[in-house]
Image (cartoon, grey):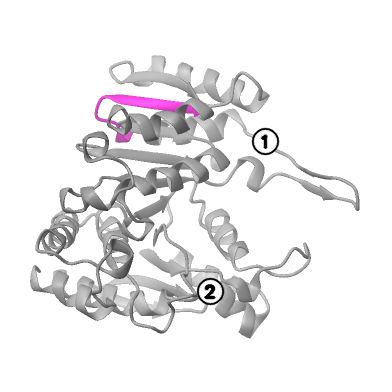
């Protein structure tokens, strides 16, 4: 029976990288998938007035996996707290599907070492995973606003911290680096205590270190090879994972997976909707292909097919494929063709 995948192309270059991803999926697993496409983000605001409708959320809940391309753009930017914003769709989807763990692998490819702003000898051999808590913390805390002041509450429970730490320890080869701000924040002191307790109880064979977030930000640039798995709360994870993205030379190369309880996972590239190049045919589809590979692996249990897609991307880059963000001139179509040749 075909696996049911909900597609959320979203905004900007989103639709332009979704169609090629389906070509890659159908090449690596012919006849395995059926697709259902929905409006999401700014595209949904334009038609329905909100970024995520109840109908779309229900469709996502019923799917085997959700593949999302990109949301947002200057058209919907606003400081009006009552106006709908595309990013509300992402938060609603994470909360509605119980997607509490965001996985972002960072593995600079040898073919792209020279595209990184960091020296080759610093990034060579880097292979790390950022595990970000996705449904708690300051993004979901109570918010207040007056003319002269504003507040955002950062709240974490023991259960929320323990479940994300368990994902991190389960993903680690040898070491988990837990990142917090325990010298200042009470939530971080609880975070550190819970992670330490879980480590001693269930994962004593994995090395655990606690690092303050400012120190972690410096070490990511100075010595990224040091890290195996980084686990941290929502806002720190948002910032550190984007910082780590630059090790690869382009945020256009990074996939991500958001997973949780019993429902489907959501898989999306880390980059934004790039409205400045939408419609030009220049979008880099590789992060979308790698997100589809994460969907195959983490969402559908198709490890062989996932590895095939990742290998095809590696081989295409090794043969010289470079889109504009990587310093080349390959179009979306040419990049897609280069990857398909290796499938």
Find out whether residue 14 is within the magenta segment.
no
* Rendered residue at 78%/65% (across/down): 80
Q: What residue does disc 1 label?
A: 155
Q: Is residue 31 above or below residue 293?
A: below
Residue 31 visible (yes or no): no
- Counting other residues with Cα less than 10 Å from the Cα at mark 2, is it few (<14), some (14-19), or many (20 or more)? many
Task: Tell me the magenta residue range.
Answer: 170-179
* Rendered residue at 11%/58% (across/down): 318
| Image x and y of residue 71, in percent | 51, 69
296, 1: nearer the viewer: 296
Element under label 2? Answer: loop
Residue 223 visible (yes or no): yes
| Image x and y of residue 114, in percent | 23, 50
Q: Which circle marks residue 40 in the picture?
A: 2
Q: Quadrant of residue 81?
A: bottom right
Mark 1 and mark 2: span between their CA atoms?
28 Å
Answer with left or right where residue 106 lies relative to residue 46: left
- Counting other residues with Cα less than 10 Å from the Cα at mark 1, is it few (<14), some (14-19), or many (20 or more)? some
21, 287: nearer the viewer: 287
Find out whether residue 176 is within the magenta segment.
yes
Which quadrant: the C terminus?
bottom left
* Rendered residue at 22%/66% (across/down): 322
| Image x and y of residue 54, in percent | 60, 71
Q: Is residue 185 above or below residue 45?
A: above
Which quadrant: the N terminus?
bottom left
| Image x and y of residue 102, in percent | 43, 47
139, 243: nearer the viewer: 243
Q: Earlier in the sequence, mark 1 or mark 2?
A: 2
Answer with left or right where residue 129 lies relative to residue 216: left
Element under label 1? Answer: loop
* Rendered residue at 10%/60% (across/down): 315
Answer with left or right where residue 208 lies relative to residue 293: right
């Amino acid at each position: 029976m075909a696996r049911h995948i909900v597609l959320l192309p979203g905004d900007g270059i989103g639709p332009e990288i979704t169609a090629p991803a389906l070509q890659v999926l159908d090449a690596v697993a012919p006849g395995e998938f059926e697709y259902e496409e929905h409006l999401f983000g700014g595209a949904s605001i334009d038609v329905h007035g909100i970024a995520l409708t109840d109908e779309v959320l229900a469709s996502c809940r019923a799917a085997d996996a959700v593949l999302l391309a990109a949301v947002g753009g200057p058209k919907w930017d606003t400081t009006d707290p009552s106006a709908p914003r595309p990013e509300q769709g992402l938060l609603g989807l994470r909360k509605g599907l119980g997607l509490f763990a965001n996985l972002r692998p960072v593995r600079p490819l040898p073919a792209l070492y020279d595209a990184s702003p960091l020296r080759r000898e610093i990034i060579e051999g880097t292979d790390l995973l950022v595990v970000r808590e996705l449904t708690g913390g300051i993004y979901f805390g109570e918010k207040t606003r007056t003319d002269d002041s504003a507040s955002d509450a950062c709240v974490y429970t023991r259960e929320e911290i323990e479940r994300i730490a368990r994902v991190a320890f389960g993903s680690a080869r040898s070491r988990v680096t837990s990142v917090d701000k325990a010298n200042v924040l009470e939530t971080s002191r609880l975070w550190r205590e819970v992670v330490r307790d879980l480590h001693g109880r269930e994962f004593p064979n994995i090395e655990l270190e606690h690092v303050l977030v400012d120190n972690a930000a410096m070490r990511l640039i100075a010595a990224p090879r040091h890290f195996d798995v980084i686990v941290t709360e929502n806002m720190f994870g948002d910032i550190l994972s984007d910082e780590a993205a630059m090790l690869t030379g382009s945020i256009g190369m990074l996939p991500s997976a958001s997973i949780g309880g019993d429902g489907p996972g959501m898989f999306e590239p880390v980059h934004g909707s790039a409205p400045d190049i939408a419609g030009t045919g220049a979008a880099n589809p590789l992060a979308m292909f790698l997100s589809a590979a994460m969907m195959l692996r983490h969402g559908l249990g198709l490890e062989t097919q996932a590895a095939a897609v990742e290998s095809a991307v590696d081989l295409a880059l090794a043969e010289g494929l470079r889109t504009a963000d990587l310093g080349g001139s390959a179009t979306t179509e040419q990049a897609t063709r280069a990857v398909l040749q290796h499938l």
